[in-house]
Image (spheres, rainbow, N blue to C red):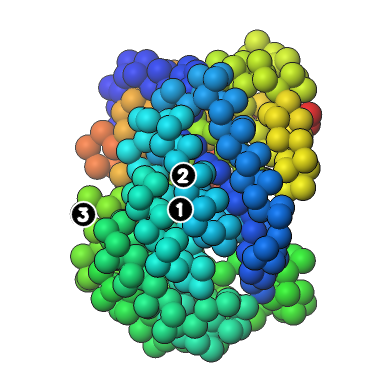
Amino acid sequence: MDGSSWGQGSAWMARLHDASAHALYLHVPFCVRKCAYCDFASRATQANDPLMAAYVGALRQQMREAHELGLLDGIQTAYVGGGTPTLVGASLLASLVGDVRELAPGVAELSCEANPDSLGDEVLQTLVRSGATRVSIGVQSLNDAELQALGRVHDARTACERVRAAVASGLDVSCDLMCATPCQDDASWQSTLAQVAGLAVGHASVYPLQLEEGTPLGERWADEGPAWNDPEVQARRMEAAAAVLGDSGYVRYEVASYAREGKVCRHNQAYWTGRPYLGLGVAASSMLTREGYQRLRRACVQLPVIDDDVSRVRLTVASGAQDIAREPALEALRFDIELLDEAQAAAEDLMLGMRLSAGVGPELLGHARSTLGEARVDGAIASCVERDLAAWDGERLEPTHDGWLLGNELYGTLWDLAPGEVREASA
């Protein structure tokens, strides 16, 4: 491939200076109980715990502040995640979703995560009435033994029933599935995949189980790599997902995501395409341009002044749920911060873009060449192509089959283009 896309990098620059976010994430950390594999920012919570109402009220206040700063002006997608947002109940959920609609009227896709056990008919109807367009259901498996081993609250019958109800409600429906888990074998995994496809959902996300330190499953298997979670098993199960879902009319558009025609998750895509996003709530992450960060600093006086060469700022909320409920103002939040210069941001965009089946196009490639150096970028790309991790399709660089399975090698090669260390701070 020659350097014909060198001059096309300027088209990529607009998203690197957008003062608004394009996607909004709201984190609701409450669950009936922690699953055996879960290291997410969530907490077991009683249904009548007053903390939930106070916390949702705090998120609503922070959204209003973000709106006043202009950070919601360009929001096109929103995602209420968790935890289990549906656990807070219909009334609180309606207030949260309704505020998103009011404060970010440009939202075209509004998703809410749910677990089958708390996705009752009242909650479904509330989501539809308040303006949600999509629900993502944590099914994980349709095998009861596997669900019990994972510590899930629901059983397979309940999951199927609630997925059918969600489809009937008119919402777009996605199912989250997990492979390489205890009690799972090739046959049970294929059965789960086939059943989910038969439920007429538009989208499915598929992830191998990661044994995380500090979780019950992680501690149980800390001293040995269980055969059921072996990397070869993970790869085989992910290939089975591609085959079964592909035969059922789903197209793999991201390393872990499959969709029927017209049902791609736009919010998901925002994370991999260099668009700025804003996250509110416990452990929520934001990625802002320099200009967006300066807007946030008007309310968050605790945030540090950044050097002139900083192009991108990543922030993670470090405040706990009780802290946020007690002091809901943006200026009271604590953050962990990463500061990227323009070259580091370009390498990051290359790495993240290769999670998508569409890969990266001439705009990003041109920007990366002009920012990181043509010889360095083309050398890294040549290495990926030589190892059959990536391939050219016209002017686009796309991941291959091996690139899907050996993602860490592909992503690592591109991230290694980033010069120096990413600076860190806290506030």
Pointer 3: residues within 10 angstroms few (<14), some, or many (20+)?
few
Q: Which residue is mark 1?
A: 112
Q: Which mark is residue 261?
A: 3
Instruction: Tell me which residue sits at (27%, 58%) in the image.
Output: 170
Q: Of discs 3 and 1, which sits in the foreground?
A: 1
Q: Are marks 1 and 2 in contact (CB under 8 Å)?
A: yes
Is label 3 in contact with label 2 (beta carbons under 8 Å)? no
Quadrant in the rendering for residue 252: bottom left
* Comes first in the chain, label 1 or label 2: 2
**Residue 69 location, x and y as percent?**
56, 19
Name the residue tied to disc 2: 97
Q: Residue 372: image x %, image y %?
A: 51, 23
Q: Residue at x 58, y 77 (%)?
A: 153
What secondary structure is found at the residue carrying circle 2?
helix
* Amino acid on which the number 3 mark rests in the picture: Glu
Please, is residue 27 above or below residue 244 in the view?
A: above
Q: Is residue 310 left or right of residue 23?
A: right
Q: Can you see residue 306?
A: yes
Please identify the quadrant where the C terminus is shown: top right
Apparent side of residue 319 relative to residue 40 in the rendered image (left or right): right
Q: Earlier in the sequence, mark 3 or mark 2?
A: 2
Quadrant in which the N terminus is drawn: top left
Q: Nearest the camera: 427 or 249? A: 427
Q: CA distance from mark 3 to mark 1?
A: 21 Å
Which of the two residues, 164 or 269, is positioned nearer the viewer here?
164
Locate residue 219: give its quadrant: bottom right
Question: Residue 407, relative to residue 15: is it above or below?
Answer: below
Name which quarter of the figure residue 423 lies in. Answer: top right
